[in-house]
Amino acid sequence: MNAPDRFELFLLGEGESKVTMEPDTRQPNTAVFTFQKEDHTLGNLLRTAMLQNEHVLFCAYKVPHPLFPKFELRVQTDDETTPKDALLAACQNLIGDLTDLSKNLTREWELSKIARDTA
């Protein structure tokens, strides 16, 4: 079979970096971030979060090949911020959003358990 072993889809190899940044010289304030061992789930989440930033002019991702678990995120910003800073801000916002979601789900789960126990 052509597919890689399952563990190769999420475990980093020796000396392999999770994220690399390559400045794009064709456009000002543009960089391409390559995420290893990730797929469309994180790519689309980051793209959506990045586009909510008013300083991000362009953000898109692509998966070069479906058998290799990596994606490339291209980010262009205005002169107010760098692509790296915009990505870090988007990640911080996502962490906050996911923390809120976890708290809300936990609270609802506990309330549903109480409602079941009293009925």
Image: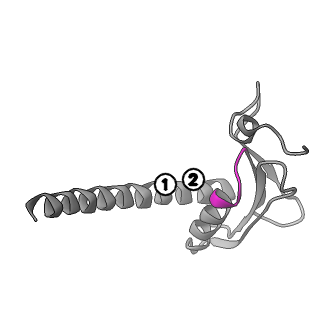
Identify which residue, 90 or 28, lies in the foreground.
90
The quarter holding residue 90 reads bottom right
Residue ranking furthest to the front: 119
Determine if residue 81 is in view: no
Q: Main secondary structure of the magenta part?
A: loop
Give neighbour class at mark 2: few <14, some 14-19, many 20+ (Cα, 10 Å). few
Say what secondary structure mark 1 lies in.
helix
Q: Residue 37 at what x, y percent from top left?
A: 72, 44
Specify the segment rendered in magenta: 37-41
Quarter of the image for the C terminus: give it. bottom left
Give the residue type at disc 1.
Answer: Gln
Is any part of residue 69 visible from this angle? yes
Q: Quadrant of residue 66?
A: bottom right
Is the C-beta separation of discs 2 and 1 under 8 Å? yes
Vertical relation: 113 (above or below) 68:
below
Residue type at mark 2: give it: Leu
Name the colouring of the figure. Answer: one colour
Residues at marks 2 and 1, CA–CA distance in whole angstroms:
6 Å
In the picture, which quadrant includes the N terminus? top right
From the viewer's perspective, is 19 left or right of 113? Answer: right
In percent of width and height, residue 80 lies at 61, 66
Is 54 a magenta residue? no
Query: Of the numbered discs in the image, which one, if any, rests on residue 88?
Result: 2
- Residue 71, by quadrant, is bottom right
> Seen in the image, is 95 located left or right of residue 28?
left
Residue at left offset 85%, top offset 45%: 3
| Residue receiving disc 1 | 92
Closer to the camera in the image, 76 or 52: 52
